[in-house]
Amino acid sequence: MAIVEGASCGLQVVSTRVGGIPEVLPEDLIILCEPTVKSLCEGLEMVIVKHRTGSLPPPAAIHNRVYDRVAKEVVLPMDERLNRLMSRCGPVAGCIFSLFAVLDFLLLVFLRWLVPDSNIDIAVDATGVRGAWRRMSTPPNTCTNTGYDSNYDVARDLNHTQ
């Protein structure tokens, strides 16, 4: 969801008050507007004023709050998930949703049997000072302090390391 990505980057989020959006982020990380152009413009202007006056928390603080909140989320075991579906969705819809959850889980188990985790390629670590993404961001045919003369050299080295 784009609003969670924005908040995780430390940005103040402006969104409409529709669907499940009000439940996604705490009220101090999101400005909820009515689904009209005028209301959205007012919300954006409110954020701009807060930014100019310095009343918004720094992006790093927002990022840390969102990260900490997500890190504390507990992954429930399947039986607790099914009990929660049954208790919150009612007897008919809860049974239907539980059936789909079980079928989804069985499909996942089958796919993991079909293509085991050991057959999945490990992604190249492109972080750090000499990371591949930093090297690839330089314009083509420019010499940098990384020792690469072009993006072609970076791509060649990445292919050889795999």
Image (cartoon, grey):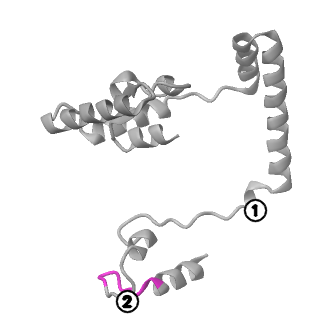
Left or right, residue 40 beside residue 3: left
Most foreground residue, 43 or 123: 43
Q: State the SS at label 1.
A: helix
Instruction: Decide if residue 74 is on the left or right side of residue 102.
Output: left
Residue 93 in the magenta stretch? The answer is no
Q: Which kind of residue does numbered mark 2 sit on? A: Asn
- Asked if residue 116 lies left or right of residue 50, the reply is right
Among numbered discs 2 and 1, the one appearing first in the sequence: 1
Q: Quadrant of residue 120?
A: bottom right
Marking on residue 119: 1
Magenta part of the protein: which range? Answer: 144-151
Please name which of the two marks, 2 or 1, marks the residue nearer to the observer.
Answer: 2
Q: Residue 52 sits in which quadrant?
A: top left
- Which residue bears the numbered disc 2? 141
Q: Amino acid at mark 1?
A: Asn
* Mark 1 surroundings: few (<14), some (14-19) or many (≥20) residues within 10 A: few
Return the x and y of residue 86 as percentages of the image width and height. Answer: 76, 14
In terms of depth relative to the viewer, which is nearer, 128 or 85? 85
